[in-house]
Image: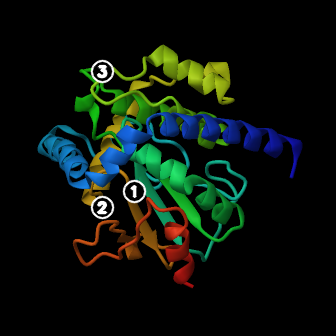
Amino acid sequence: MSSKNSKANDARAAAKAQAQAQVRAQERRTMLMIVAGSIVGLAIFGGLIFFIINQGKVEPLGTEGATAPAAADATGGIPVGTTGVVGEDLATDVPRVDVYLDFMCPICNVFEQTNAEELDAMREAGEIQVYYHPISILDRYSSGTDYSTRSAGAAGVVAHLAPEAYLDFTAAMFANQPEENSEGLSDAQIEQIAIDAGVPEEVAASLADDGMKKWATAATEQASVDGMRGTPTVRVSATGDFADGVILNEQGNDDAPVVDYFTAGELRAYIESLG
């Protein structure tokens, strides 16, 4: 492994460690959210319904004025290759895993701490393709600051202009996740988090780009069209073709494959079972 990759891995490990410490510190709150899944589900569902009601006001992906990350595909997914760089060294002829996350969503943070390391290991080994979808359905939980849209747009800018820092940046965003029903992080705070995660200062200064925020909103609409049920949502295609993908169900209340992806190892085991 090159020194560059070692430094990147060290930075990401530090961000993960900080996130894990935050999760442990808030363990009581987090576990209550998981145990009371129906309550959390209703809140997320409410946010999704709120978004769907307002879909008519949103331009579709590719609309004029939206600035999409160069590597993002038609679903709004941001692919990360075997080296950890967006859009580079993508594995082929392997299962595709699409992960939909909202940076305001505390359960998404739990998902990340549970699965990020194993997904990284499989991706680095060329065993899976991973596409990340920064989603903005929880704006109404940020006291009017549209934190979900701002943070998703910032992730898009990093993917576009600093693709080698994308994973470190998103890990750091979860490590510094604000409480729901707060104002969220300010643009200045997001900028500093980006710089600390290795994003060049000139790129970090452009994270509030309106065109990328417009893309994030359109990508969220596309996600709902593609079956996103809230956040986190995990879609897996055994063939590697998005169209063949199925959305996993951690609760077992419909015909989707039941995978308890809040238990370490379960998501990986399911993917490996696809052969």
Q: Is residue 121 visible?
A: yes
Above or below, 236 relative to 230? below
Tell me, for residue 145, which label it has, or none. Answer: 3
Q: Which residue is painted at 64% across and 23% down in the image?
A: 195
Q: Is residue 64 visible?
A: no
> Looking at the picture, which amino acid does disc 3 mark?
Thr
Q: Residues within 10 Å of mark 1 (few under 14, many from 20)?
A: some
The answer for how far apart the CA atoms under marks 2 and 1 are is: 8 Å
Q: Nearer the viewer, residue 208 or 74?
A: 208
| CB contact under 8 Å: marks 2 and 1 | yes
Counting residues from the start of the chain, the first of labels 1 and 3 encountered is 1
> Looking at the picture, which amino acid does disc 2 mark?
Asp
Q: Which residue is painted at 68% across and 50% down in the image?
A: 84
Q: Which residue is painted at 44% across and 63% down in the image?
A: 261
Q: Quadrant of the C terminus?
A: bottom right
Q: Which secondary structure, mark 2?
A: loop
Q: Residue furthest left?
A: 53
Q: Residues within 10 Å of mark 3 (few under 14, many from 20)?
A: some
Give the residue at mark 1: 75
